[in-house]
Amino acid sequence: MTSLDDLPIRDDLRGQHPYGAPMIPVRYALNVNENTHPIPEPVAREIIESLARAILTVNRYPDREFTELRENLAAYLGHGITPEQVWAANGSNEIIQQTLQAFGGPGRTVLGFPPTYSMHPIIAAGTGTSWLTAARDADYRISPETAVAAIEAQHPDLVFFCAPNNPTGTPLPLATIEAAYDATDGIVFVDEAYAEFMPHDAPSALTLLPGRERLLVSRTMSKAFAFAGARLGYLAADPAVADALRLVRLPYHLSALTQAASIAALHHAPEMLAMVDDIAAQRDRMLAVLPELGFRVFESQANFVLFDGLDDPAATFRALLERDILIRDVGIPGALRVTAGTAEETSFFLQSLAELGSGGAR
Ligand SMILES: *Cc1c(COP(=O)(O)O)cnc(C)c1O
């Protein structure tokens, strides 16, 4: 038996840790911000029919330009976005990877604002891009001044924002994105994985795209669309950005089955998204109830809530797990993150936490 240390791995990967959210089978899986509602059965049937047609031609490579999928994604996004402005990959993680392959890489830097999405630094490491960080303001916000000061101090090649931010839920003002864009000649990447859970009147960074050819806005079908297992992420940007990503993507990276399933799901966007408002309501319920239980919550516009005031988050995590509830320890002292699920799941979580109290054990 050999170990990783014995292999001639790249020096810059030595000592790195892989993404490792625990995968534990539980009744209440509220740990990785999935949509806990299953796909409606009539929609599932249409997806299966679409897959059944696609399987008959898998002897051929799929459409390398995934044209029909891009048309459907553009129509779904609205905001006047054209298919040429859309690019897709196997999850937005691959979108991030391709972005860093094209615009980052050895000798280049990407600036992020922790605590933020844990995959951003991991994908930076995988692509040999140096990960730079800057502090957030109070309550995990990022003002335009804070973003500009960090960019002027560190001159990154790329700036990564997450809006709303994972793991805190914090919204990001468009003014911060605009100011950051004006302060850099590099790429500004806005990860909007949770955009559909924002209040209906909250503007998306998509509205900033016209005239900003270095702005990239990524989305995913994993969360709002209940499609985490199908792996489809995408971005909107200037068409030239897609040309840049064509240089690094693997040919035929989106399988015919992925394309077929995603197109069928997009044809039923309203049904697929029917649960989003319910989930947002459960999030708001947690934001209201957790303070009554003595915890502090942070404003969230995503499908999860970060709460703190725990004496021993690891003990609370374990005690909840004993009750078949899996949430997430994101490494923030005194805090845990929980995904908003169905009303029943949310009730069971809140009731269990109330019984445990801030000490985490009875
Ligand atoms: C969950 C999540 C993603 C989704 O990644 P996929 O590869 O599309 O499943 C992307 N960004 C953030 C911030 C996330 O929380």
Image: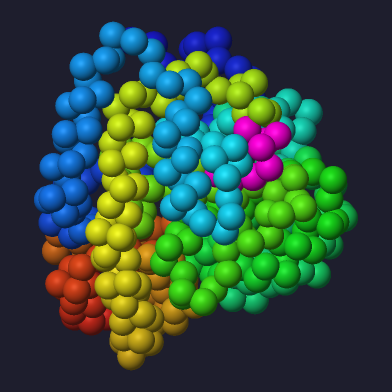
Q: Quadrant of residue 311?
A: bottom left
Q: Quadrant of the N terminus?
A: top left
Q: Position of residue 332 (x, y in %)?
A: 49, 62
Q: Up-down: is 249 above or below 30?
A: above
In which quadrant of the rendered view does residue 83 lie? top right
Q: Name the residue located 63 percent from the left edge and 33 percent from the top edge.
A: 242
In the image, is residue 236 part of the stretch drawn in magenta? yes
| Apparent side of residue 345 relative to residue 62 in the rendered image (left or right) | left
Give percent across and percent down for residue 354: 23, 81
User: Residue at point 49% right, 54% down?
Assistant: 77
Is 227 located above or below residue 288 in the figure? Answer: above
Magenta stretch holds residue 319 = no
- Would residue 56 be seen by someone viewing this image from the given angle? yes
Query: Quick check: 132 left or right of 341?
Result: right
x 28%, y 36%: residue: 261
Give the quarter of the image for residue 60. Answer: top left
Stretch of the chain drawn in magenta: 235-242
Q: Is residue 122 visible?
A: no
Residue 349 % position (x, y): 21, 71
In the picture, the quarter occupied by the C terminus is bottom left
Q: Nearer the viewer, residue 227 or 171?
A: 227
Q: In this rendered view, identify the residue nearer to me: 207 or 300.
A: 207
**Residue 295 at x, y = what percent?**
39, 82
Q: Residue at x 31, y 48 (%)?
A: 267
